[in-house]
Amino acid sequence: MKISIISGSHRNPSQSEKIGRYVEKLFNTEFSDIDPFLYLLADNPLPLWDQSVWEDNPEWAERLAPLKEQFSNSDAFVIITPEWHGQVPSGLKNLFLLLSRFELGHKPAFIISVSSGTGGTYPVAELRMSSYKNNRLCYIPEQLIIRDVEKVFNDNESDNDQRSDGYYKERLSWCLDILLGYAKALKTMRAETEINNDKFSNGM
Ligand SMILES: Cc1cc2nc3c(=O)[nH]c(=O)nc-3n(C[C@H](O)[C@H](O)[C@H](O)COP(=O)(O)O)c2cc1C
């Protein structure tokens, strides 16, 4: 099963990337038969959406083809977002403008938000409120809000707050297992249901 992990920070380096690499490692070591694909928005690899995306601009088609292939073949997503001024970073919102129901539709997604302080709630609310409408990504009820992110998930154990680190890691493994459960269930649902109806191509 293929799972895409999207690190939504366009800072380089970033705490989101640190978490993304941990999730990738976990899929490779703790779970069997998972093929993780980690996609980093570090340094803004994608230009801002423009009108020509809808006019079959060949440059856009070429740029997006490899990404669309990876995402179309994915059965589930882990979306990692930092809180930036109370928001999801613009690069991550831009990615959602560039993707569609054909890559993401009716596939489960698990949100991880990160904050160096006590934030992290707003980007979860923002993703759940407005990022799925047309692409039909299905956010699962579980989410992980990693507060004081600089004190957990570090390779050097002495940099970690042991109690928080242990708690987040245990909870993350449990949540990823739930995500895989949804991935299996929704794969069957997509195969057995008419999910694409061109009359209703956009969500309401
Ligand atoms: C532009 C910017 C705005 C930020 N705004 C917030 C904020 O509103 N709330 C918060 O908890 N942390 C905020 N932070 C701190 C981030 O939580 C912290 O930098 C975290 O590491 C960001 O994740 P990243 O390293 O993956 O980009 C902000 C950081 C940046 C760079």
Image (cartoon, rainbow, N blue to C red):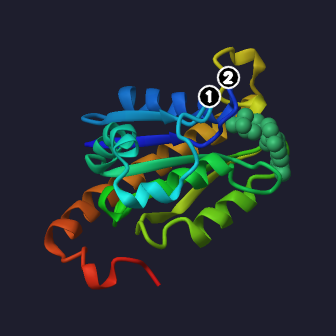
Q: Amino acid at mark 2?
A: Asn
Mark 2 is surrounded, within 10 Å at the Cα level, by few (under 14), some (14 to 19) or many (20 or more) other residues, namely some
For marks 1 and 2, the one nearer the N-term is 1
- Label 1–label 2 contact, CB within 8 A: yes
| Quarter location, residue 147 | top right
Q: Is residue 185 left or right of residue 41?
A: left
Residue 184 % position (x, y): 26, 57
Is the CB of the residue bearing disc 2 within 8 angstroms of ligand 1? Answer: no
Residue at 43%, 55% (x, y): give it: 53
Residue 172 % position (x, y): 54, 44
Residue at 40%, 77% (x, y): give it: 202
Direction left: furthest residue: 192
Q: Is residue 109 left or right of residue 172?
A: left
Q: Amino acid at mark 1?
A: Lys
**Image quadrant where one finds the N terminus:** top left
- The residue singled out by tag 2 in the image is 154
Q: Is residue 117 left or right of residue 98?
A: right
The dot on residue 85 is none
Ligand 1, what quadrant? top right
Q: Secondary structure at mark 2?
A: loop
The dot on residue 18 is 1
* Residue 150 shows in the view: yes
Is the CB of the residue bearing disc 1 within 8 angstroms of ligand 1? Answer: yes
Q: Secondary structure at mark 1?
A: helix
Residue 135 % position (x, y): 41, 66
